[in-house]
Image (spheres, helix red, strand yellow):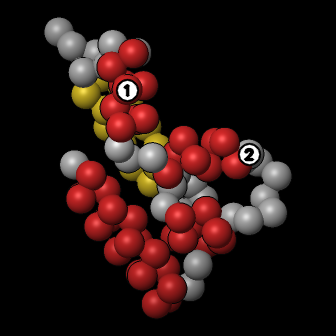
């Protein structure tokens, strides 16, 4: 049986901009979370992971109202779909 990593996260640039000034995440963490390409794949391979279950990190769109939340969720979904 392969190794499955659950609760893996990513962060879109738009959501990262909304978190600007939040002390919880460094720029390096933002960069790692934003990557859906070669660096993430290299980390998955290095960790011996066969499948990664990925979703948007928190806080997510629940921190925004109405149309802004919808636009941010659509952006996150589209970016993840394109990466997959």
Q: Return the x and y of residue 31 as percentages of the image width and height.
A: 58, 47
- At 74% across and 45% down in the image, what residue appears? 26
**Residue 3: x, y in percent?**
28, 16
Q: Which residue is mark 2?
A: 26
Element carrying mark 1: helix
Going from the N terminus, do you reach mark 2 or mark 1 first?
2
On screen, residue 69 versus residue 53, left or right, reads right
The quarter of the rendered structure image containing the N terminus is top left
Where residue 46 sits, quadrant-wise, is top left
34 on left or right of 42: right
Which residue lies at the image location 50% right of the left edge and 51% below the top edge?
34
Give me the residue at 74% from left, 65% from top.
20
Q: Nearer the viewer, residue 66 or 78?
A: 78
Q: Secondary structure at mark 2?
A: loop
Q: Residues within 10 Å of mark 2 (few under 14, many from 20)?
A: few
Q: CA distance from mark 2 to mark 1?
A: 21 Å
Circle 1 packing at 10 Å, graded few (<14), some (14-19), many (20+), is few
Q: Are the residues tagged 2 and 1 within 8 Å (C-beta)?
A: no
* Residue at numbered disc 1: 42
Task: Give residue 15's position: percent from left, percent from top.
Answer: 56, 67
Q: Position of residue 40 (x, y in %)?
A: 40, 35
Task: Confirm whether residue 7 shows in the render.
Answer: no
Decide which of 22, 39 is in the foreground and name it.
39
């Amino acid at each position: 049986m392969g190794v499955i990593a659950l609760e893996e996260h990513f962060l879109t640039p738009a959501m990262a901009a909304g978190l600007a000034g939040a002390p919880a995440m460094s720029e390096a963490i933002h960069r790692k979370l934003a990557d859906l390409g070669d660096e993430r794949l290299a980390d998955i391979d290095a960790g011996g992971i066969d499948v990664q279950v990925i979703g948007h990190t928190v806080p997510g769109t629940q921190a925004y109202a109405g149309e802004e939340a919808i636009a941010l969720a659509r952006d996150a979904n589209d970016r993840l779909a394109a990466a997959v």
